[in-house]
Image (tube, grey):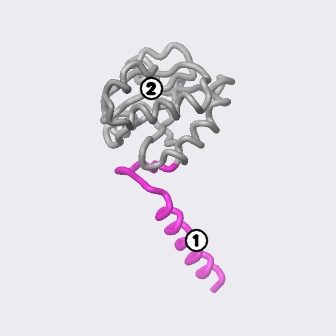
Amino acid sequence: MDEELERIKKEKMLKLIKEDVPTVGNFPVADVTELDDNSMEPFVKQQGIVVIDCWAVWCGPCRTMEPIMQQLAKEWVGKVTIGKLNVDQNPRASMKYGISSIPNFLVFQDGKFLGNVVGAVGKKPFEKLFKKLLSDDKDKKEGYT
């Protein structure tokens, strides 16, 4: 009886968690989504504004940016989606976008690659970038990186 009750509680908790996390396609959008060479393109195409955090385990500045990107993902949910790509494990994406320095943040809008932001720049430059990209004024969108 106790095992059955625990199973039911676990199922209900999982259901509640899934309801609280918005998704687009198969991807959660309220947190940073782990990506790889195969999932990156579909992820970018299913979202509006996307930032892909290209990082490596050994990179100190990348670790500094990780909590910032997680915070931005939560604060901008529904407007901006953030993914994370380990460059050591995903050489195709690294080569395609010419990633030679990390952290390197690839910026996309409506599936189109717009450019990148390189370095541990902090939170404010991303907030400024997101506001520009969400603006209706096309002139403001140019020259963001």
Front position in the image: 143 or 70 = 143
Residue 20 covered by magenta stretch: yes
Q: Position of residue 9 (x, y in %)?
A: 59, 76
Q: Which residues are the magenta region?
A: 1-30
Left or right: 40, with 1 as reference point: left
Q: Name the amino acid, label 2.
A: Leu
Percent of width and height locating residue 134:
38, 37
Extreme bottom residue here? 1
Residue pictured at 42% horizontal, 31% vertical: 132
98 over 26 or under it: above or below: above
Q: Are marks 2 and 1 in contact (CB under 8 Å)?
A: no
Residue 50: image quadrant is top left
Q: Secondary structure at mark 2?
A: strand
Q: Amino acid at mark 1?
A: Lys
Residue found at x 33% / y 24% = 139
- Nearer to us of marks 2 and 1 is 2
Is 75 on the left or on the right of 24, as rendered? right
The residue where tag 1 is placed is: 10
Q: Position of residue 57 (x, y in %)?
A: 63, 28
Image mark count? 2
Principal SS element in the magenta part? helix
Identify which residue is drawn at 66% across, 24% down.
61
